[in-house]
Image (cartoon, rainbow, N blue to C red):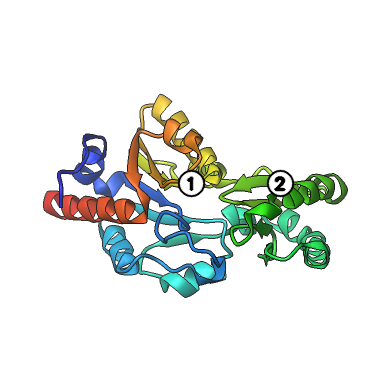
Amino acid sequence: MGALPEILLPFAEDPGHSALCLDFDGTLSAIVADPVGARPWPGVPALLARLAARFALVAVISGRPPDFLHEVLGSPAGVTLIGLYGLGQVGPDAGSWEPVVAALVDRARAEAPTGIYVEPKGLTLTLHWRHAPETAAWAHEFAAREELGSGLRVHPGRMSLEFRPPLDVDKGTVVRALAQGMRAVAVFGDDLGDLPAFDAVAELGERGVVVARVAVIDAESDDRVAAQSDLVVEGPVGAVTLLEELAQAAAVSG
């Protein structure tokens, strides 16, 4: 283990008033060709439980459905798991969009060329073209048309486009709600969907909260993620290693 980066020292020194908000795909798990097969990096569930025993809040905030997060992470003790960017927590306004998403899933499956993976997630739908990069143009054309017709919003991701209900809910709104009363808040993320969370902690920093935005990058990462971060690590192995160092430092200080 290396020395803990200076920006994270306040978290290790005062874990009882610190929050860790972590992405899943690309941060706690490797990016894989088939999203269904994504699994946490070895040892992550136990690591999260160790962190939760020290820190005021440890949350995994993901665009995945909540059931998926509970399945692959095993509901580690004390860890808050929030799926679908928090959409499931905003009440009936979100649920009313399920039939719209279901109809869109049917249209996407009927029209998608070979190589496009249509991933239905209840309140959201993601189109992936990692298996067939040449189909990206189709995905963008389909998304532009359906955004107008369905009323859903389209959000770019890693070789993917995601349709979500047009509600003002994202990782940033979730972080703002979770961070109330915290003296220090860190966000770990790898993709454009994590930037609202980066923005949220930047706002907290302007109000005197200690903050850290950790970009988890690899060769295909969008440059904007690293550009808006305070610290960069290489892939899930870098993120998990840093969290291990943080867990050890907090245990020593405690």
Residue under the point 40% across and 66% down: 40
Task: State left or right for residue 106 relative to residue 246.
Answer: right
Closer to the camera in the image, 142 or 22: 142
Q: Position of residue 56 (x, y in %)?
A: 33, 52
Q: Looking at the image, which residue sits at the far right?
A: 149
Q: Earlier in the sequence, mark 2 or mark 1?
A: 2
Q: Which residue is mark 1?
A: 220
Q: Looking at the image, which residue sits at the far left?
A: 252
Residue under the point 21% across and 45% down: 12
The amino acid type, in three-letter code, at marker 2 is Val
Decide: few, some or many residues near mark 2? Use Cα within 10 Å; few <14, some 14-19, many ≥20. many
Residue under the point 26% across and 35% down: 7
Closer to the camera in the image, 210 or 248: 248
Q: Position of residue 87 (x, y in %)?
A: 63, 55
Q: Under tag 1, what secondary structure? A: loop
Q: Position of residue 252 (x, y in %)?
A: 12, 52
Q: Under tag 2, what secondary structure? A: strand
Which mark is drawn over residue 154?
A: 2
Q: CA distance from mark 2 to mark 1?
A: 20 Å
Q: Position of residue 5 (x, y in %)?
A: 22, 39
Residue under the point 67% across and 42% down: 168
Q: Looking at the image, which residue sits at the far front?
A: 134
